[in-house]
Amino acid sequence: MIEITEAPISPERVIEKVKNDSSGCVVTYVGLIRNRSQGRPVLSVEYQDSDGNATSTLQAIADEARNRWPIESIAISHRTGKLMVGEINLVVAVASAHRSEGFAACQYAIDQFKQRLPTQKVESYRDL
């Protein structure tokens, strides 16, 4: 499951999309909007998919993880729109038979998300 959504993300729903009876684990990452960035107090963060390529970027990341590790399933859900401090902006869930592959694939997906940032990100600060 690859999802770009403006609705709040439920980590439990994303986990349900990947787990099955042969899963030994589901490794999950929940990304949050934090209250400080670059030493400044954050008011909000806005993510936009103005060019419409975010889904294909996330799909490529998921496909790469599947090709590198023997995982059963991977789901990536990324929230767009204006998010306030404490809100969930990203959930990555990886189901695998063994935890080592699950952790490695999840770490890879998170790192690639940060490197490729499939959406435009604009931070607003409280001191402006």
Image (spheres, rainbow, N blue to C red):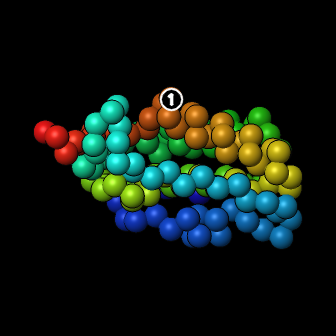
Q: Secondary structure at mark 1?
A: helix
Numbered-mark total: 1
Q: Residue at x 82, y 62 (%)?
A: 23
Residue, disc 1: 115
Left/right of residue 99 with respect to residue 113 in the rendered view: right
- Farthest-out residue, left: 128
Q: Residue at x 34, y 55 (%)?
A: 85
* Residue 32 visible in the displayed image: yes
Above or below, 60 against 15 in this view is above
Mark 1 neighbour class, 10 Å CA radius: few under 14, some 14 to 19, many 20 or more: few
Camera-side residue: 84 or 21? 84
| Quadrant occupied by the C terminus | top left
| Quadrant occupied by the N terminus | bottom right
Q: Examine the image and state in which quarter residue 21 appears.
A: bottom right
Q: Examine the image and state in which quarter residue 125 appears.
A: top left
Camera-side residue: 69 or 82? 82
- Name which residue type carries label 1: Gln
Estimate the x, y position of residue 9 in percent, counting from the top left. 46, 64
* Residue 51 visible in the displayed image: no
Left/right of residue 38 with respect to residue 113 in the rendered view: left
Left/right of residue 111 with respect to residue 53 in the rendered view: right
Estimate the x, y position of residue 5 in percent, counting from the top left. 40, 58
Estimate the x, y position of residue 122 in percent, counting from the top left. 27, 39
Estimate the x, y position of residue 49 in percent, counting from the top left. 34, 43
